[in-house]
Amino acid sequence: MRDAALGRTLAAQRPRMQELLRQSVELASPSGQEGEFTRFIEGWARGQGFEADLWETDEARLAKFTEARAKHLPLRGRPTLVVRLPGREGPALLLNAHADTVGADAAGRLPLPGAGEGRVYGRGACDDKGPLVGALWAMLALRETHPQGLSGDLLLELVPGEEDCVGLGTLTSLVRGYRGRGAVVLEPTENLPRCASRGGLRFEIACTGRAVHGTVKWLGRDAIASARRVLDALDALESRWNDRQADPLFAAYPIARPVTVDSVQGGRWQGMVAASCSCGGYFELLPSDDLVEWKGRFESELRAMLPEESLEIRFPESYGGHRTATDDPLCRAAEAAVDAAAQEGGAVHWHGWSAFNSGCEAGVRFREQGTPTLVWGPGSLAQAHAAEEFVDFRDVETFAGMLSHFALVYSEGNHGE
Protein backbone atom coordinates (compact mmCIF):
# COMPACT_ATOMS: atom_id res chain seq x y z
CA MET A 1 0.00 0.00 0.00
CA ARG A 2 1.07 3.56 -0.59
CA ASP A 3 2.19 5.95 2.14
CA ALA A 4 -0.99 7.50 3.61
CA ALA A 5 0.70 10.85 4.17
CA LEU A 6 1.77 10.89 0.54
CA GLY A 7 -1.82 10.31 -0.59
CA ARG A 8 -3.14 13.15 1.58
CA THR A 9 -0.44 15.48 0.30
CA LEU A 10 -1.19 14.67 -3.33
CA ALA A 11 -4.88 15.41 -2.73
CA ALA A 12 -4.12 18.72 -1.02
CA GLN A 13 -1.98 19.82 -3.97
CA ARG A 14 -4.70 19.04 -6.54
CA PRO A 15 -5.94 22.62 -7.18
CA ARG A 16 -2.52 24.13 -7.84
CA MET A 17 -1.49 21.25 -10.10
CA GLN A 18 -4.71 21.55 -12.08
CA GLU A 19 -3.91 25.22 -12.55
CA LEU A 20 -0.34 24.39 -13.61
CA LEU A 21 -1.64 22.00 -16.26
CA ARG A 22 -4.12 24.58 -17.53
CA GLN A 23 -1.40 27.24 -17.78
CA SER A 24 1.00 24.81 -19.44
CA VAL A 25 -1.47 23.83 -22.15
CA GLU A 26 -2.46 27.45 -22.80
CA LEU A 27 1.21 28.35 -23.39
CA ALA A 28 1.89 27.17 -26.95
CA SER A 29 5.26 25.47 -27.47
CA PRO A 30 5.58 23.98 -30.98
CA SER A 31 9.02 22.67 -31.95
CA GLY A 32 11.39 25.57 -32.39
CA GLN A 33 9.33 27.82 -30.12
CA GLU A 34 9.38 25.92 -26.84
CA GLY A 35 11.76 28.29 -25.02
CA GLU A 36 9.07 30.41 -23.38
CA PHE A 37 7.35 27.33 -21.98
CA THR A 38 10.62 25.89 -20.65
CA ARG A 39 11.39 29.16 -18.89
CA PHE A 40 7.85 29.19 -17.46
CA ILE A 41 8.42 25.75 -15.91
CA GLU A 42 11.79 26.90 -14.59
CA GLY A 43 10.10 29.86 -12.87
CA TRP A 44 7.40 27.63 -11.41
CA ALA A 45 9.97 25.12 -10.11
CA ARG A 46 12.12 27.80 -8.50
CA GLY A 47 9.01 29.33 -6.96
CA GLN A 48 8.26 25.97 -5.33
CA GLY A 49 11.78 25.83 -3.89
CA PHE A 50 13.31 23.30 -6.30
CA GLU A 51 16.83 23.60 -7.66
CA ALA A 52 16.80 24.34 -11.38
CA ASP A 53 19.48 24.36 -14.07
CA LEU A 54 18.59 26.12 -17.35
CA TRP A 55 20.99 26.39 -20.30
CA GLU A 56 21.35 26.46 -24.06
CA THR A 57 23.64 23.95 -25.75
CA ASP A 58 26.32 24.73 -28.30
CA GLU A 59 25.58 22.32 -31.15
CA ALA A 60 29.31 21.77 -31.67
CA ARG A 61 29.25 19.71 -28.46
CA LEU A 62 26.81 17.28 -30.09
CA ALA A 63 28.64 16.82 -33.39
CA LYS A 64 29.74 13.23 -32.73
CA PHE A 65 26.17 11.97 -32.27
CA THR A 66 24.02 10.60 -35.08
CA GLU A 67 20.98 12.59 -33.96
CA ALA A 68 22.87 15.88 -34.28
CA ARG A 69 23.67 15.12 -37.92
CA ALA A 70 19.99 14.66 -38.75
CA LYS A 71 17.96 17.47 -40.25
CA HIS A 72 16.63 19.55 -37.35
CA LEU A 73 15.70 23.02 -36.23
CA PRO A 74 18.66 24.93 -34.73
CA LEU A 75 18.97 24.69 -30.95
CA ARG A 76 19.69 28.39 -30.51
CA GLY A 77 17.03 29.94 -28.27
CA ARG A 78 15.74 26.52 -27.20
CA PRO A 79 16.95 25.85 -23.64
CA THR A 80 17.05 22.61 -21.66
CA LEU A 81 15.95 22.52 -18.02
CA VAL A 82 16.77 20.11 -15.19
CA VAL A 83 14.74 20.33 -11.97
CA ARG A 84 16.40 18.63 -8.98
CA LEU A 85 15.00 17.17 -5.79
CA PRO A 86 18.17 16.52 -3.76
CA GLY A 87 18.58 13.13 -2.12
CA ARG A 88 20.96 11.48 0.24
CA GLU A 89 24.04 9.80 -1.13
CA GLY A 90 23.00 7.24 -3.71
CA PRO A 91 22.12 6.81 -7.37
CA ALA A 92 19.80 9.23 -9.12
CA LEU A 93 16.48 8.53 -10.79
CA LEU A 94 16.06 10.58 -13.96
CA LEU A 95 12.73 11.65 -15.44
CA ASN A 96 12.57 12.93 -19.02
CA ALA A 97 9.89 15.09 -20.67
CA HIS A 98 9.90 17.10 -23.87
CA ALA A 99 8.82 20.74 -23.93
CA ASP A 100 7.76 20.90 -27.56
CA THR A 101 4.51 19.91 -29.24
CA VAL A 102 3.44 19.36 -32.81
CA GLY A 103 1.69 22.27 -34.51
CA ALA A 104 -1.74 22.51 -36.08
CA ASP A 105 -3.54 19.51 -37.56
CA ALA A 106 -3.83 18.90 -41.31
CA ALA A 107 -6.66 21.43 -41.58
CA GLY A 108 -4.56 24.13 -39.92
CA ARG A 109 -6.48 23.96 -36.64
CA LEU A 110 -5.10 23.96 -33.13
CA PRO A 111 -7.08 22.30 -30.34
CA LEU A 112 -8.38 25.06 -28.10
CA PRO A 113 -7.39 24.90 -24.44
CA GLY A 114 -10.35 24.07 -22.25
CA ALA A 115 -11.82 21.60 -19.80
CA GLY A 116 -14.79 19.29 -19.56
CA GLU A 117 -15.74 16.10 -17.71
CA GLY A 118 -12.38 16.05 -15.97
CA ARG A 119 -10.53 16.47 -19.24
CA VAL A 120 -8.06 19.20 -20.17
CA TYR A 121 -8.06 19.92 -23.90
CA GLY A 122 -5.39 21.60 -26.00
CA ARG A 123 -2.23 20.94 -27.96
CA GLY A 124 0.27 19.14 -25.75
CA ALA A 125 -2.31 18.13 -23.13
CA CYS A 126 -1.22 14.49 -23.21
CA ASP A 127 1.94 14.85 -25.31
CA ASP A 128 3.71 15.88 -23.17
CA LYS A 129 2.36 18.36 -20.64
CA GLY A 130 0.03 16.04 -18.72
CA PRO A 131 2.87 13.57 -18.02
CA LEU A 132 5.19 16.48 -17.15
CA VAL A 133 2.75 17.96 -14.63
CA GLY A 134 2.21 14.50 -13.12
CA ALA A 135 5.96 14.18 -12.57
CA LEU A 136 6.27 17.65 -11.02
CA TRP A 137 3.33 16.78 -8.78
CA ALA A 138 5.08 13.62 -7.59
CA MET A 139 8.28 15.56 -6.87
CA LEU A 140 6.36 18.19 -4.92
CA ALA A 141 4.59 15.56 -2.80
CA LEU A 142 7.80 13.60 -2.15
CA ARG A 143 9.62 16.72 -1.00
CA GLU A 144 6.85 17.54 1.47
CA THR A 145 6.43 14.03 2.86
CA HIS A 146 10.10 12.99 2.82
CA PRO A 147 12.06 16.15 3.73
CA GLN A 148 15.14 14.04 4.40
CA GLY A 149 15.18 13.18 0.68
CA LEU A 150 15.24 9.89 -1.16
CA SER A 151 18.41 7.82 -1.15
CA GLY A 152 19.51 9.61 -4.32
CA ASP A 153 18.62 12.67 -6.36
CA LEU A 154 15.36 12.78 -8.31
CA LEU A 155 15.97 14.71 -11.53
CA LEU A 156 13.46 15.90 -14.11
CA GLU A 157 14.85 17.05 -17.46
CA LEU A 158 12.70 19.07 -19.84
CA VAL A 159 14.26 18.89 -23.30
CA PRO A 160 13.56 20.62 -26.62
CA GLY A 161 12.83 19.14 -30.01
CA GLU A 162 11.45 15.62 -29.55
CA GLU A 163 8.74 16.26 -32.14
CA ASP A 164 11.33 17.69 -34.54
CA CYS A 165 14.27 15.31 -34.13
CA VAL A 166 13.98 12.38 -31.72
CA GLY A 167 16.85 12.17 -29.23
CA LEU A 168 18.55 15.50 -29.95
CA GLY A 169 17.12 17.22 -26.88
CA THR A 170 18.16 14.47 -24.48
CA LEU A 171 21.71 14.71 -25.79
CA THR A 172 21.84 18.32 -24.55
CA SER A 173 21.35 17.04 -20.99
CA LEU A 174 23.67 14.07 -21.45
CA VAL A 175 26.61 16.27 -22.50
CA ARG A 176 25.84 18.58 -19.57
CA GLY A 177 26.75 15.62 -17.36
CA TYR A 178 23.36 14.43 -16.16
CA ARG A 179 22.70 10.74 -15.83
CA GLY A 180 20.71 8.35 -13.67
CA ARG A 181 20.85 4.79 -12.51
CA GLY A 182 17.38 4.44 -13.98
CA ALA A 183 15.22 6.63 -16.19
CA VAL A 184 11.54 7.19 -16.96
CA VAL A 185 10.63 8.87 -20.23
CA LEU A 186 7.31 10.66 -19.75
CA GLU A 187 4.92 9.88 -22.61
CA PRO A 188 1.21 8.98 -22.88
CA THR A 189 1.05 5.24 -22.10
CA GLU A 190 -2.43 5.04 -20.54
CA ASN A 191 -0.71 5.08 -17.15
CA LEU A 192 0.90 1.68 -17.70
CA PRO A 193 4.73 1.48 -17.64
CA ARG A 194 6.28 0.21 -20.88
CA CYS A 195 9.68 -1.45 -20.95
CA ALA A 196 10.50 -1.03 -24.66
CA SER A 197 10.07 1.52 -27.46
CA ARG A 198 10.52 1.69 -31.21
CA GLY A 199 13.46 2.75 -33.29
CA GLY A 200 12.83 4.29 -36.66
CA LEU A 201 13.82 6.12 -39.82
CA ARG A 202 12.45 9.23 -41.44
CA PHE A 203 12.32 8.84 -45.22
CA GLU A 204 11.95 11.34 -48.05
CA ILE A 205 11.19 10.07 -51.56
CA ALA A 206 11.38 12.39 -54.58
CA CYS A 207 9.79 11.35 -57.90
CA THR A 208 11.01 12.98 -61.12
CA GLY A 209 8.81 13.43 -64.19
CA ARG A 210 8.66 15.64 -67.29
CA ALA A 211 6.28 18.57 -67.40
CA VAL A 212 3.98 19.19 -70.38
CA HIS A 213 0.63 20.86 -70.92
CA GLY A 214 -2.24 18.75 -69.61
CA THR A 215 -3.91 18.49 -73.01
CA VAL A 216 -0.92 16.51 -74.34
CA LYS A 217 -0.17 14.68 -71.12
CA TRP A 218 0.84 11.51 -72.98
CA LEU A 219 3.98 13.35 -74.12
CA GLY A 220 5.19 13.95 -70.57
CA ARG A 221 5.78 11.91 -67.43
CA ASP A 222 3.53 12.63 -64.46
CA ALA A 223 5.52 12.75 -61.20
CA ILE A 224 2.27 12.82 -59.20
CA ALA A 225 1.24 9.52 -60.79
CA SER A 226 4.68 8.16 -59.87
CA ALA A 227 4.15 9.26 -56.27
CA ARG A 228 0.78 7.47 -56.26
CA ARG A 229 2.55 4.25 -57.21
CA VAL A 230 5.12 4.89 -54.46
CA LEU A 231 2.35 5.25 -51.88
CA ASP A 232 0.79 1.97 -53.00
CA ALA A 233 4.19 0.27 -52.79
CA LEU A 234 4.74 1.58 -49.26
CA ASP A 235 1.41 0.08 -48.20
CA ALA A 236 2.50 -3.23 -49.69
CA LEU A 237 5.84 -3.13 -47.86
CA GLU A 238 4.13 -2.41 -44.54
CA SER A 239 1.95 -5.47 -45.12
CA ARG A 240 4.95 -7.60 -46.18
CA TRP A 241 6.89 -6.66 -43.05
CA ASN A 242 3.97 -7.12 -40.66
CA ASP A 243 5.47 -10.01 -38.68
CA ARG A 244 3.52 -9.50 -35.46
CA GLN A 245 5.26 -12.44 -33.76
CA ALA A 246 8.72 -10.95 -34.26
CA ASP A 247 8.62 -9.28 -30.84
CA PRO A 248 6.15 -10.42 -28.15
CA LEU A 249 6.21 -6.99 -26.49
CA PHE A 250 4.70 -5.47 -29.65
CA ALA A 251 2.43 -8.40 -30.58
CA ALA A 252 -0.73 -6.69 -29.33
CA TYR A 253 -0.39 -3.92 -31.92
CA PRO A 254 -1.95 -4.57 -35.37
CA ILE A 255 1.10 -3.38 -37.32
CA ALA A 256 4.59 -4.66 -36.50
CA ARG A 257 6.50 -2.02 -38.48
CA PRO A 258 4.31 0.99 -39.35
CA VAL A 259 5.10 3.01 -42.49
CA THR A 260 3.38 6.39 -42.13
CA VAL A 261 3.39 9.01 -44.90
CA ASP A 262 2.85 12.43 -43.32
CA SER A 263 3.46 14.74 -46.27
CA VAL A 264 2.99 14.78 -50.06
CA GLN A 265 4.01 17.74 -52.22
CA GLY A 266 3.84 18.04 -56.00
CA GLY A 267 2.88 20.24 -58.87
CA ARG A 268 3.45 23.93 -59.42
CA TRP A 269 1.36 25.23 -62.30
CA GLN A 270 -2.29 24.77 -63.14
CA GLY A 271 -3.07 22.62 -66.15
CA MET A 272 0.37 20.98 -66.33
CA VAL A 273 1.68 17.51 -65.74
CA ALA A 274 3.97 17.79 -62.71
CA ALA A 275 7.71 17.49 -63.14
CA SER A 276 8.29 16.59 -59.50
CA CYS A 277 6.45 15.17 -56.51
CA SER A 278 7.76 14.06 -53.14
CA CYS A 279 6.50 12.32 -50.03
CA GLY A 280 7.93 11.92 -46.55
CA GLY A 281 7.16 10.00 -43.40
CA TYR A 282 8.36 7.58 -40.76
CA PHE A 283 9.25 3.90 -40.89
CA GLU A 284 9.06 2.64 -37.31
CA LEU A 285 10.90 -0.50 -36.29
CA LEU A 286 11.28 -2.98 -33.45
CA PRO A 287 14.05 -2.50 -30.86
CA SER A 288 16.05 -5.45 -32.22
CA ASP A 289 15.83 -4.29 -35.85
CA ASP A 290 19.16 -3.05 -37.18
CA LEU A 291 18.61 0.47 -38.55
CA VAL A 292 21.28 0.17 -41.24
CA GLU A 293 19.97 -3.18 -42.44
CA TRP A 294 16.37 -1.97 -42.60
CA LYS A 295 17.36 1.23 -44.34
CA GLY A 296 18.90 -0.93 -47.07
CA ARG A 297 15.84 -3.19 -47.23
CA PHE A 298 13.49 -0.24 -47.49
CA GLU A 299 15.35 1.26 -50.44
CA SER A 300 16.19 -1.96 -52.30
CA GLU A 301 12.72 -3.48 -52.02
CA LEU A 302 10.97 -0.24 -52.97
CA ARG A 303 13.15 0.14 -56.06
CA ALA A 304 12.59 -3.51 -57.00
CA MET A 305 8.82 -2.94 -56.90
CA LEU A 306 9.07 0.23 -59.03
CA PRO A 307 11.87 -0.39 -61.55
CA GLU A 308 10.50 2.11 -64.08
CA GLU A 309 10.33 5.03 -61.65
CA SER A 310 12.99 7.70 -61.22
CA LEU A 311 13.30 7.95 -57.43
CA GLU A 312 15.61 9.72 -55.03
CA ILE A 313 15.40 8.18 -51.54
CA ARG A 314 16.90 9.85 -48.49
CA PHE A 315 16.84 9.15 -44.74
CA PRO A 316 17.32 12.48 -42.94
CA GLU A 317 16.72 11.16 -39.42
CA SER A 318 17.12 7.92 -37.48
CA TYR A 319 16.64 6.98 -33.84
CA GLY A 320 17.18 3.83 -31.82
CA GLY A 321 14.66 1.90 -29.78
CA HIS A 322 15.24 0.35 -26.38
CA ARG A 323 14.32 -2.67 -24.27
CA THR A 324 14.73 -3.02 -20.49
CA ALA A 325 14.65 -6.49 -18.96
CA THR A 326 11.45 -7.05 -17.01
CA ASP A 327 13.38 -8.40 -14.01
CA ASP A 328 15.36 -5.15 -13.70
CA PRO A 329 14.83 -3.32 -10.37
CA LEU A 330 13.28 -0.45 -12.34
CA CYS A 331 10.56 -2.75 -13.67
CA ARG A 332 10.00 -4.40 -10.31
CA ALA A 333 9.50 -1.00 -8.67
CA ALA A 334 7.04 0.00 -11.39
CA GLU A 335 5.05 -3.22 -10.89
CA ALA A 336 4.83 -2.49 -7.16
CA ALA A 337 3.52 1.01 -7.84
CA VAL A 338 0.88 -0.23 -10.31
CA ASP A 339 -0.20 -2.98 -7.88
CA ALA A 340 -0.58 -0.44 -5.07
CA ALA A 341 -2.68 1.85 -7.27
CA ALA A 342 -4.91 -1.04 -8.36
CA GLN A 343 -5.45 -2.15 -4.76
CA GLU A 344 -6.56 1.37 -3.87
CA GLY A 345 -9.11 1.47 -6.67
CA GLY A 346 -7.07 3.40 -9.21
CA ALA A 347 -8.16 3.11 -12.84
CA VAL A 348 -5.21 0.93 -13.88
CA HIS A 349 -5.46 -2.61 -15.20
CA TRP A 350 -2.15 -4.42 -15.38
CA HIS A 351 -1.90 -7.23 -17.94
CA GLY A 352 1.86 -7.72 -17.97
CA TRP A 353 4.70 -6.00 -19.74
CA SER A 354 4.39 -4.57 -23.23
CA ALA A 355 6.05 -1.89 -25.35
CA PHE A 356 5.40 1.76 -26.15
CA ASN A 357 4.21 1.76 -29.75
CA SER A 358 6.33 4.72 -30.88
CA GLY A 359 9.79 6.16 -30.96
CA CYS A 360 10.74 8.55 -28.14
CA GLU A 361 13.71 9.81 -26.13
CA ALA A 362 14.21 6.45 -24.39
CA GLY A 363 16.80 5.14 -26.83
CA VAL A 364 19.45 7.79 -26.18
CA ARG A 365 20.56 7.08 -22.62
CA PHE A 366 19.87 3.39 -23.05
CA ARG A 367 22.37 3.35 -25.93
CA GLU A 368 24.94 5.86 -24.66
CA GLN A 369 24.94 5.09 -20.93
CA GLY A 370 23.26 1.69 -20.63
CA THR A 371 20.51 3.22 -18.49
CA PRO A 372 17.52 0.95 -17.72
CA THR A 373 14.55 2.94 -18.97
CA LEU A 374 10.75 2.90 -18.83
CA VAL A 375 8.20 4.90 -20.82
CA TRP A 376 5.25 5.93 -18.67
CA GLY A 377 2.56 8.56 -18.30
CA PRO A 378 -1.13 9.53 -18.42
CA GLY A 379 -3.02 9.91 -21.68
CA SER A 380 -3.00 7.82 -24.83
CA LEU A 381 -1.34 7.86 -28.22
CA ALA A 382 -4.90 7.84 -29.57
CA GLN A 383 -5.20 11.46 -28.38
CA ALA A 384 -1.62 12.61 -29.03
CA HIS A 385 -1.35 14.91 -32.08
CA ALA A 386 -5.13 14.66 -32.55
CA ALA A 387 -7.36 17.54 -33.62
CA GLU A 388 -8.93 17.47 -30.14
CA GLU A 389 -6.00 16.42 -27.99
CA PHE A 390 -6.81 15.99 -24.31
CA VAL A 391 -5.75 14.38 -21.08
CA ASP A 392 -8.02 13.42 -18.18
CA PHE A 393 -6.81 15.25 -15.08
CA ARG A 394 -7.85 12.29 -12.94
CA ASP A 395 -5.33 10.18 -14.87
CA VAL A 396 -2.65 12.80 -14.22
CA GLU A 397 -3.37 12.53 -10.51
CA THR A 398 -3.27 8.72 -10.64
CA PHE A 399 0.08 8.90 -12.40
CA ALA A 400 1.49 11.34 -9.83
CA GLY A 401 0.58 8.85 -7.10
CA MET A 402 2.09 5.87 -8.91
CA LEU A 403 5.26 7.76 -9.83
CA SER A 404 5.85 8.97 -6.27
CA HIS A 405 5.35 5.42 -4.94
CA PHE A 406 7.63 4.06 -7.67
CA ALA A 407 10.38 6.58 -6.84
CA LEU A 408 10.27 5.58 -3.17
CA VAL A 409 10.46 1.85 -3.91
CA TYR A 410 13.21 2.24 -6.48
CA SER A 411 15.23 4.58 -4.24
CA GLU A 412 15.09 2.19 -1.29
CA GLY A 413 15.95 -0.83 -3.42
CA ASN A 414 19.00 0.84 -4.99
CA HIS A 415 20.43 2.60 -1.97
CA GLY A 416 24.19 2.48 -1.94
CA GLU A 417 24.53 0.61 -5.25
Image (cartoon, rainbow, N blue to C red):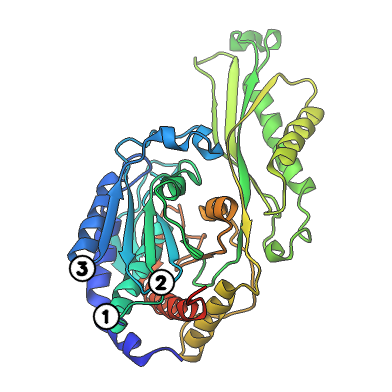
Give whichever of 39, 239 is nearer the camera: 39
Q: Which mark is residue 144?
A: 1
Q: Earlier in the sequence, mark 3 or mark 2?
A: 3
- Where residue 242 appears, as percent x and y from the top left, is 76, 52
Name the residue rendered at 50%, 17% in the picture. 268
User: From what the image shows, is residue 215 above or below residue 30?
Assistant: above
| Residue at x 31% of width, y 45% of height | 79
Are the residues flagged by discs 1 and 2 in contact, CB closer than 8 Å?
no
Pick the residue in front: 112 or 416. 416
Q: CA distance from mark 1 to mark 2?
A: 16 Å
Q: Which residue is mark 3?
A: 48
Which quarter of the picture shows residue 292? Answer: top right
**Amino acid type, label 1:** Glu
Residue topped by disc 2: 152
Label 2 sits on a secondary structure element that is: loop
Q: How far apart in space, not on screen, are marks 3 and 2 (Cα)?
A: 20 Å
